[in-house]
Amino acid sequence: MVAAQREKTTVRLDRVDAIATQVKAALQSKIQVINSELESAKEKHQAKLELQQKAQKLIKQGFQAAVSDFESWLYLPKLLERYQSKLATALQQGEFSSWQAQFQQDIDGYQQAIQEWVDKACEFFEHQSPGKLIISVPDTPQVIIPEPPEFSQESKKVIPIGLSTGIRLVLKGKVGAAMAGGASYILSKGAKKDKSNSSADSYDHQVAQALSDAAQDYLSCFSTDAFSMVRKYQAKAEKVISLPTNQQPQDTSSQVYQLQLLNSVLERLNAELII
């Protein structure tokens, strides 16, 4: 009787052990799956961060290169070398508006190159745009023209400027002003020299110098203002060319809780099996 009871008990224990072993294997398998999922989520988050870091580096380099190119172009000696003579000629010929339109196209090219990198950063990092880079040009230049060497009664009404074929001043007395091609021209009585020592060539030189000075003043003012605008915009743009600060990895809280629960059950099961 006792032997039979022991045999039954042994059979039951064997069955319990078999079931416990199966449960333990299932728990371990589920724990392994969850651990793999958590590790995969961690790897994906890390890969995303690394991708963003690479993108930030490339975008920042591109943005800085575009800004550097524009600032190099804005450097006053280079501006004067490239544009002063052409601007003076445009002023001489009364074609300032046409010259300014082409000048604005050159500016727009540099603006667009900078803006493209900022737009890429906003799209990639999901930042709000800091707005467009706006570069304004100075007011139309005012050219101070010296009074011609011989100011006769016949020339009081209409006097051609020495080097110009496109500008004529409408005068009232000995000081006059006119608009031509988008620029203003003033005949300056105070700028004249001793008529007895003046010649057509020297007067033409004075007019040419006045046009050159006006071109230089215009470009100098533009360079100073544009540098300031670029640097203010650069400070705004650099804030969007940065990694988001509130990035969180994928929500794995439920999986972590489930993992803790399964580990707890497995520990208790192991303890029961030892007993």
Image: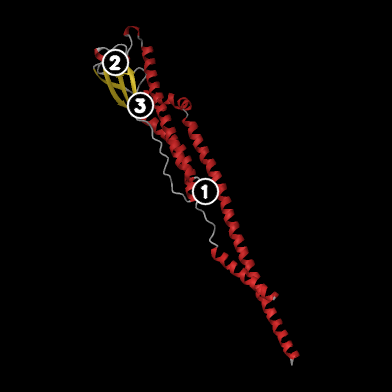
Q: Residue at x 26, y 12 (%)?
A: 152
The N terminus sits in image quarter = bottom right
The C terminus sits in image quarter = bottom right
Amino acid at circle 3:
Pro
Q: Which residue is mark 2?
A: 189
Asked whether, in this view, residue 189 is left or right of residue 20, the answer is left
Q: Secondary structure at mark 1?
A: loop
Asked whether, in this view, residue 122 is left or right of residue 206, the answer is right
Amino acid at circle 2:
Lys
Q: Residue 189: where, in percent of width, then height?
A: 29, 15
Q: Are marks 3 and 1 in contact (CB under 8 Å)?
A: no
Above or below: residue 242 compared with residue 208: below
Amino acid at circle 1:
Leu
Q: What's the CA distance linking mark 3 and mark 1?
A: 45 Å
Q: Residue at x 71, y 88 (%)?
A: 8
Asked whether, in this view, residue 62 is left or right of residue 17, the answer is left
Q: Which residue is mark 1?
A: 243
